Amino acid sequence: MPWLRIDDGMPEHRKILALPRNDRWTWIELLAYVARQNNGGHVPDGITSIIRYVTPTFLRRCEALELLDRDETGLNVHDWHIYNGETLEAKVTAYLTTNPEASANDVHRAIGGKREIVLAL
């Protein structure tokens, strides 16, 4: 069973607050769907026919807020690998890729996990 890691500060994050209130639950539904697919955060083509309130307008709004990133594969959840990577090592690597000056404590605060293991990585 896949799990979805969500920071407990997510409801107050500026990007989430910028979404209309009704879209906030749709964002959670999208994240849960992506987690179930176990595809590294990729939002599949045709998602608008899979999740009821995921519309092209919703996706554009999420992309404008940088909740979603677009690359050659399509749309992907921003920083998916940091918070929902396959392994702790993958999460540490992903975090350090976007935050190369981060201390070991910064990494631990961002991704969680057993402190000793995160600090060792």
Image: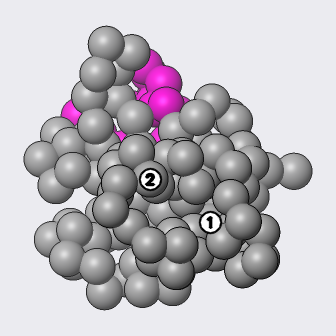
Q: Are marks 1 and 2 in contact (CB under 8 Å)?
A: no
Q: Position of residue 116 (x, y in %)?
A: 77, 77
Q: Residue at x 72, y 44 (%)?
A: 86
Residue 113 lies in quadrant = bottom right
Which residues are drawn in magenta?
42-58
Q: Is residue 9 visible?
A: yes
- SS at circle 1: loop
| 66 left or right, relative to 100 | left
Q: Residue at x 63, y 30 (%)?
A: 39
Residue 96 got which mark? Answer: 2
Residue 21 lies in quadrant = bottom left
In the rendered view, would you say 23 is above or below 76? Answer: below
Q: Is residue 110 visible?
A: no
- SS at circle 2: helix
Front position in the image: 88 or 101: 101
| 69 left or right, relative to 32 | left
Q: Position of residue 87 (x, y in %)?
A: 74, 48
* Location of mark 1 (residue): 5
